[in-house]
């Protein structure tokens, strides 16, 4: 029994149906992920072209490197919808870079420069702290990277953690003005990671706003259209891990987000785990979305745990 449990926990080898229906992998620490979110917010709003943005970017690089990842910075000057040159930096951290078969985990790390959905119009020109809408996805990925380094088991696949930049400098009148970093990465993937081809990625999972209070993760429309098999896999993993209440088997509508160019340009089947509040009057993205209240006081460790442990379940049931 001890040997069987060890093999299951390591996620290696072939699994029977009964084994894949059991929780596997290390325990995701919500406290650790929460701290990673706090440390990003300690720099202040990570708006494009700001000192806080540059400082936090280097911190993210150093954290992934500290967990044994091979890190590349993909810097580019991108053009915002208003003509502003944006000094963008996609941060790519690779676990087991020698592995040809890989999965993609991604999140954006920049902050929106305008709290233009705040109920107080006086706040519309203020930057968003982005504890949830930015920091939470990176915090979850850093905790997974920490666990992978600490685990003595060798997974049969590699993982690319990609922190997309310039996601939130967008205009509501122009869908193409969002997800600029992801658009750039998707176009440059062959030249930037010359030893990879898009088809070596089995799939991708985007994390956006994965720490909010009262959050639920409905099945996003583009995800179902482009990668429904991945949606089914992740929502099943949430059920096995004990977090089905956070991942209802219901549709949440289509969202313009980083996963769209990953699907349409890079041709990698990629889903979006993103919060959806069907009954929230302020926004279907929740009451703090693009407001000055997207801060650490409104993050929930339970939400971070639900998403993080679900991803651990997905990762540790990958096969050769």
Image (cartoon, rainbow, N blue to C red):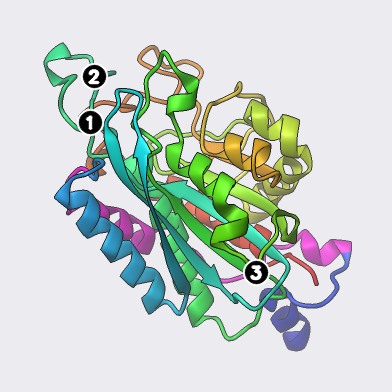
Q: Nearer the viewer, residue 295 or 160?
A: 160
- Range of residues picked out in magenta: 17-45
Q: Is residue 48 on the magenta stretch?
A: no
Q: Secondary structure at mark 1?
A: loop
**Residue 293: assigned label:** 1
Tell me whether circle 1 and circle 2 mark residues in contact (CB < 8 Å). yes
The answer for how far apart the CA atoms under marks 2 and 3 are is 44 Å
Query: Closer to us: mark 2 or mark 3?
Result: 3
Apparent side of residue 136 relative to residue 19 in the rendered image (left or right): left
Sequence-first tag of 3 and 1? 3
Are there few (<14), some (14-19), or many (20+) residues within 10 Å of tag 1? some
**Residue 118: assigned label:** 2
What residue is at 49 percent from the left and 44 percent from the top?
184
Q: Residue furthest left?
A: 122
Q: Secondary structure at mark 2?
A: loop
Find disc 3 in the rendering and name its residue: 195
Q: Nearer the viewer, residue 278 or 62?
A: 62
Q: Secondary structure at mark 3?
A: loop
What residue is at 53 percent from the left and 74 percent from the top?
148
Q: Quadrant of the N terminus?
A: bottom right
- Taking 18 as reference, is 227 above or below it? above
Are there few (<14), some (14-19), or many (20+) residues within 10 Å of tag 2? many
Q: Nearer the viewer, residue 316 or 111?
A: 111
Residue 7 in percent (x, y) is at 74, 81
Q: Quadrant of the C terminus?
A: bottom right
Residue 9 in percent (x, y) is at 67, 75
Are there few (<14), some (14-19), or many (20+) residues within 10 Å of tag 3? few
């Amino acid at each position: 029994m001890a040997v069987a449990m060890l093999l299951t926990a390591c996620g290696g080898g072939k699994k029977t149906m009964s084994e894949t229906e059991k929780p596997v992998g290390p325990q995701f620490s919500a406290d650790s992920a929460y701290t990673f979110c706090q440390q990003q917010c300690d720099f202040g709003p990570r708006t494009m072209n700001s000192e806080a943005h540059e400082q936090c970017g280097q911190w993210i690089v150093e954290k992934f490197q500290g967990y044994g990842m091979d890190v590349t910075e993909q810097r580019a000057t991108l053009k915002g919808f208003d003509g502003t040159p944006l000094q963008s930096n996609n941060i790519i951290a690779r676990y087991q870079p020698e592995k040809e078969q890989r999965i993609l985990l991604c999140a954006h790390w920049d902050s929106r420069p305008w709290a233009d959905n705040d109920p107080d119009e006086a706040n519309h020109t203020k930057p968003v702290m982005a504890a949830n809408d930015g920091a939470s996805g990176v915090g979850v990925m850093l905790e997974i990277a920490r666990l992978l380094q600490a685990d003595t088991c060798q997974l049969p696949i590699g993982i690319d953690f990609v922190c997309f930049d310039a996601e939130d400098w967008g205009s509501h009148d122009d869908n193409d003005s969002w997800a600029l970093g992801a658009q750039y990465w998707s176009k440059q993937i062959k030249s930037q990671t010359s030893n990879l081809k898009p088809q070596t990625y089995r799939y991708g999972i985007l994390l956006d706003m994965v720490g909010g209070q009262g959050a639920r993760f409905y099945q996003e429309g583009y995800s179902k259209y482009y990668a429904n098999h991945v949606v089914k896999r992740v929502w099943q993993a949430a059920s096995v891990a004990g977090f089905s209440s956070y991942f209802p088997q219901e549709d949440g509508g289509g969202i313009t987000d980083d996963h769209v160019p990953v699907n349409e340009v890079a041709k990698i089947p990629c889903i979006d785990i993103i919060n959806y509040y069907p009954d929230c009057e302020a926004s279907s993205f929740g009451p703090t979305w693009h407001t000055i209240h997207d801060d650490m006081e409104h993050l929930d460790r339970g939400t971070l745990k639900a998403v993080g442990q679900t991803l651990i379940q997905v990762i540790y049931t990958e096969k050769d």
